[in-house]
Amino acid sequence: MEVLVSVLTAKDFGSAIRTRRKKLGYTQAQLADACGVGVMFVSQLENGKETTQLEKALRVANMVGLTIDLKERG
């Protein structure tokens, strides 16, 4: 079943990452290692830090099986 989540803020994005990571049973350290980023990065990403690097954030989302689709709001 496909679940759609509206992401309008860094906090929304981080929450989606955290939820998916936990569903997959990864620790922050395991996810960080698999993505080639630091544990601090994963923590800050999940907590909605607004200055997170986009490329790394997309790498983490991809690793936990999340796809980012952009659409125009009507």
Image (cartoon, grey):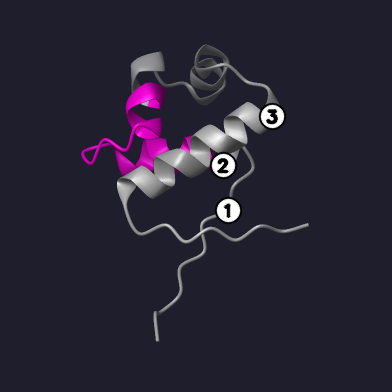
* Residue at the disc numbered 3: 24
Dot 2 and dot 1 residues touching (CB under 8 Å): yes
Residue at left offset 67%, top offset 32%: 23
Q: In the rendered structure, which disc, 2 or 1, sits on the residue that comes first in sequence?
A: 2
**Which three-letter amino acid code belongs to the residue tagged 3?**
Leu
**Which three-letter amino acid code belongs to the residue tagged 2?**
Asn
To which quarter of the image does residue 21 belong? Answer: top right
Please tell me whether residue 55 is drawn above or below residue 29 in the rendered image: below
To which quarter of the image does residue 30 belong? Answer: top right
* Residue at the disc numbered 2: 62
x then y, percent, for residue 34: 57, 21
Part of the protein shown in magenta: 42-61
* Residue at the disc numbered 1: 67
Question: In which quadrant will I find the C terminus?
Answer: bottom left
Q: In the rendered structure, which disc, 1 or 3, sits on the residue that comes first in sequence?
A: 3
Please tell me whether residue 58 is drawn above or below residue 5 in the rendered image: above
